[in-house]
Image (tube, rainbow, N blue to C red):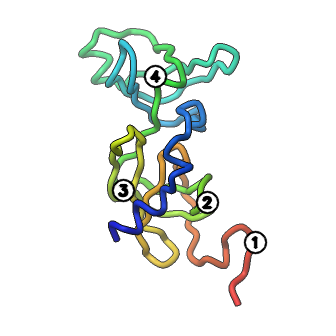
Amino acid sequence: WQASLSMSLGSGQRSAAAADAKIVHGDNVVVVRGDLHGLSGRVKSIDEAEGTVLIEIEKEMAAALDFTDDVPVPVADLVKTFDIGSRVKVVGGMHQGQTGVVVITRVGDSGDHSAVLTLDAGGRRVEVLVRDLRTTREIVTSVEDLQGFRLY
């Protein structure tokens, strides 16, 4: 399945800017650039005018670093994170509309963050950029459920 993983990312997706990360309230994120590199937490609010996100730092990390307040971070410095076993829905790219479970997360040679999913419909493994994922409880069990298309 290794060959199909690299094909599913496509060359056009690899060069997308971090600003297209589709970060929303409640997402788990990690800082990948700047003075706060490595800091992780949950998105508390987004200031689109300033291009920043207010991060609620994980309690253990906040205590270790002596942070008492939430931290504003430029959205371009953030990447979504997903735990192994997280149920996700693909909201962009060639697998849009499908759901699955995260089995691997990784950083590519070009710095793109991706996750390998086992899809609910068919059990295939595909690799998707994390910017194209969101946490969900939904389960798509057949490709007939996808985007209103039917198979004949």
Q: Amino acid at mark 3?
A: Gly
- Chain-order first, disc 2 or disc 4: 4
User: Mark 2 and 4 residues: CB-CB less than 8 Å, in contact?
Assistant: no
Q: Which mark is residue 85?
A: 3
Q: Amino acid at mark 4?
A: Glu
- Chain-order first, disc 4 or disc 3: 4
Residue 67's place in the image compared with 76, above or below, is above
C-alpha span from label 4 to label 3: 23 Å
Residue 8's place in the image compared with 52, above or below, is below
Q: Residues within 10 Å of mark 1 (few under 14, many from 20)?
A: few
Pinpoint residue 112: horizontal percent, then vertical percent: 42, 41
Q: Secondary structure at mark 4?
A: strand
C-alpha span from label 2 to label 3: 19 Å
Residue 150's place in the image compared with 6, above or below, is below
Q: Amino acid at mark 1?
A: Gly
Q: Nearer the viewer, mark 2 or mark 4?
A: 2
User: Is 132 on the left-hand or right-hand side of 28?
Assistant: right
| Residue pointed to by mark 4 | 56
| Residue pointed to by mark 2 | 96
- Chain-order first, disc 2 or disc 3: 3
- Chain-order first, disc 1 or disc 3: 3
C-alpha span from label 1 to label 3: 27 Å
Pinpoint residue 124: horizontal percent, then vertical percent: 43, 73
User: Mark 1 and 2 residues: CB-CB less than 8 Å, in contact?
Assistant: no
C-alpha span from label 2 to label 4: 29 Å
Who's the residue at 32% across and 55% down the image? 104
Q: Residues within 10 Å of mark 4 (few under 14, many from 20)?
A: many
User: Mark 2 and 3 residues: CB-CB less than 8 Å, in contact?
Assistant: no
Q: Which mark is residue 148?
A: 1
